[in-house]
Amino acid sequence: MKGWKRKRGQAMLERRLPVGVLRWVGATGLAAGALGLTLLAAGVVLALGGYSPLRAGTALVSGALGSPDAFLSVTLVRAVPLVLTGLAVSLAFRAGVWNIGAEGQLYAGALLGAAVGLVSPGLPAPLHLPVLLLAAGLGGALWAAVPALLKTKLGVGEVVTTLVLNFVALNLTSWAVRGPLQENRGIFPQSDQVAEAARLAPLWEGTRLHWGFPVAVAVAVLLWWVLKYTPVGFRLRAVGAAPNAARVAGRIRVKPLTLGTFLVSGMVAGLAGGVEVAGVTYALYEGLSPGHGYTAIAVALLARLNPLGVIISGTLFGGLEGGAGAMQRDVGIPAAWVRVIQAFVILSALAIERWVRARPHSVFVHPPSAPGGAP
Amino acid sequence: MSELLAPFFEASVRLGVPLALAALGETITERSGVINIGLEGSIIAGAFAGALGALAWGAPGGAIAGLMAGGVAAAVFAFFALGLGADQIITGTAVTIGGLGLTAAAYETRFGPTGTALSLPTLDPLPVPLLAELPLLGRALFAQPVTAYAAYLLAPVLWWYLQRTAWGLELRAVGEEPCAAEAAGVAVVRTRVFATLFGGAMGGLAGVHLSLAHTATFAEGMSAGRGFIALAVVVLGRWNPLGVVAAALLFGAASALQFSLQALGLNLPYQLFLALPYLLALLALAGWVGRTRAPAALGQPWPAGR
């Protein structure tokens, strides 16, 4: 069997450097490989479409990184919901839960969060923001509870249920901003602005970057710590890797764990919606998310489902989306190409994952973290 | 009453046909043990290629272009999920995201950022003589575009293929017990690839119905989750082509309710009706589970444990 005997060079490396470092190097290399493949494919497609890949690339990079303000106000601001939904997806996938409903959970969170933010005169000022974020998390968890209970109580596969609930959430939002939550003027399909006290303050004056970014980073660190160092995190990873072994040999009760993971995943996605309302839009409207919940899958896979990696991959996609806006303005390339790039990233990451799985004994990679098995 | 019911039945069939076509294809795919979430990508690819093809060669050419585009989207899925053995759910999601993005971007590139309202050559209703004159259901069932007749025809043909032919038996064996099928000399991966390509082409045809028969235009994201509803339709139809068409018509009726109830002057929010097919899909999956059984190897990679 190929790779059965470790290469001598790898064994020597392992003696000199901690395994953790080697695996970070490996994960970074794999992500870079996936991105490299993607850029190559994107360049070819752009050239075929009659655009100059070089000009497109320049516009994209300068739009995302060209100035401190571009980085802070465009890239990082866009990264916040992507990191949070990416975390939601990573957590679920690690436990073998196919939550493809982060988009709907985000909207449910935004809806409930905005409803709380609009209460006026209502809560004492210092409480308004925390209650808004809590409500958003609750909204996401409630929305995830439907497929979670269907899965654990009735055995209904979560893939289709989470997907169709995304469309239900969109229609619910569409109704809310034309009905109970519509602005007082009653002209546009959007809500009024949430109370001042319920908003996330800018991190630095003069930029649009808000406190949602540190919140997202904190959630990432927390989830990373829970997964890596706590018993529940261990059980979660065990269930994701091999549910039957976890149940039989590990005596892990799979269903409560699945239910809990699903709810927390939904909560984090809902928080993303609340943070968008409290930090960026200050109001609820239909196009609040241009598909963050779907991009989140690319974000999570590029990070190989590692919560700390999600911070980096989420920022990368934030830059990609922000830069795509500049690309559309300057070079006239439709921003929708970004979604094609996201699909490329997912497919490259999958191809590389297969390549890794054929080399199970390399020191550079974790044992496969993505769960297998039937949907 | 019949002046209200006849348009309702007509709309039910018109809205049910794309679901029936896509779900019939997915039925074959799933019976071979493959779950293709990328069906949504095939539908939108079919709708867009159908529009482009219709502009270039007229409606029949558009139908063929759409069919092929749906197959191409499924080929991408097949390469990663069946060729490389990557996870089927994630691969399918990527194909859907890519299909929606590519068609939106190409539409903008071709027709400008504002999106010109296209007026396409259409697949017009072809009334069947005599049958179309039947009261109440006549026009609903037999004054439809050719895509509807394709669905009527394919349902029994596919049922016969699955249940009564040696090829159908091989396909079902691959989806239930790939190990046994391989031992019996069936090429598992090849069978699954063909089943997946067929499913994608049917998704493409569903897209053609949307752009050429249902609306005569193309709009970004016009597939609107029909690929996902088709997955629920397959479950509700118990992986049986005849049941699947019946289930698709039920979902078509749920979508058609919005027009009829609005005509009745019921003052309910229209978003409720838009959400109805999705809610119905949810209910169907919840209520039907345990009373039906998916192909045993559905979603599992081959060779096992790869």
Image (cartoon, coloured by chain):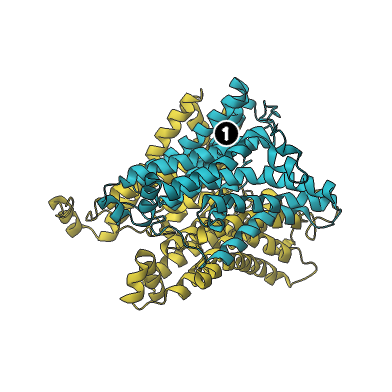
Question: At x 52% / y 64%, what residue is drawn?
Answer: A265
Q: What residue does disc 1 label? A: B105
- Subunit under mark 1: B
As drawn, the chain in yellow is A
Q: Nearer the viewer, residue A233 or B82?
A: B82
Residue at 46% over, 25% down: A47
In percent of width and height, residue B102 lies at 53, 35
Residue B223 rendering spot, x and y as whole percentages: 61, 42
Q: Position of residue B201 (x, y in %)?
A: 50, 37
Coordinates of residue B246 in the picture (x, y in percent): 61, 52
Q: Is residue A248 left or right of residue B51?
A: left
- Tell me: A168 left or right of A241: right
Question: Where on the picture, by quarter, is residue A35?
Answer: top left
Badge 1: residue crowd in 10 Å (few <14, some 14–19, many ≥20): many
> Can residue B199 be seen?
yes
Tell me the SS state at disc 1.
helix
Q: Is residue B76 above or below residue A105?
A: above
Amino acid, disc 1: Ala
Closest to the observer: B116 or A230? B116
Q: In the rendered picture, chain B carries what hue?
A: cyan
The image shows residue A225, relative to residue A161, as above or below, that is: below
User: Taking A55 as reference, is B254 above or below it?
Assistant: below
Label count reads 1
Q: Note whether residue A323 is visible.
A: no
Q: Within the image, what quadrant is residue A372 found in?
A: bottom left
Between B196 and A68, the one nearer to me in the picture = B196
Quadrant position of residue A231: bottom left
Q: Residue furthest front?
A: B130
Outermost residue, bottom direction?
Answer: A251
- Give the residue at x 42% y 33%: A41
